[in-house]
Image: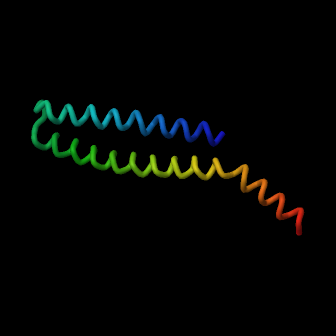
Amino acid sequence: MVDIIIRSALDIVGRTERLIEAMKRLLQSKGLDEVEVYELDYEIERLGDMVFNMDEAVRSLARTVEGWPQQVLAHEIRRTLH
């Protein structure tokens, strides 16, 4: 279940990064007025920050989950020794 969450979250991160790049190209095309450019630029920055944070959180979760089998095994060994 956790692996599905991790894969889905990383997929969302990838899609969002592509969306940010497409919005940046739209900004460079000069088809928007000054207010629209400012609002879009602001939203791109916020979205980029959120994607970065989400990416870090998901990768941290993945590293934690990878260590679970070893932690369970170590816990079982300690419990049987005491």
Residue at 50% in and 40% down: 9
Q: How many marks?
A: 0
Visual colour scheme:
rainbow
Quick one: quadrant of the C terminus?
bottom right
User: x%, y% of residue 52?
Assistant: 39, 48
- Quarter of the view holding residue 26: top left
User: x%, y% of residue 72?
Assistant: 76, 54
22 left or right of 72 in image: left
User: x%, y% of residue 80?
Assistant: 89, 62
Q: Nearer the viewer, residue 65 or 50?
A: 65
User: x%, y% of residue 65?
Assistant: 64, 49
Q: Nearer the viewer, residue 21 or 80?
A: 80
Residue at 83% in and 64% down: 78
Quick one: quadrant of the N terminus?
top right
Q: Nearer the viewer, residue 59 or 29?
A: 59
Indicate whether 79 appears above or below 58. below
Indicate whether 32 appears above or below 70. above
Residue at 48% in and 39% down: 10
Q: Farthest residue to the bottom: give it.
A: 82
14 left or right of 81 in image: left
53 left or right of 29 in image: right
Q: Nearer the viewer, residue 58 or 72?
A: 72
Residue at 33% in and 46% down: 48
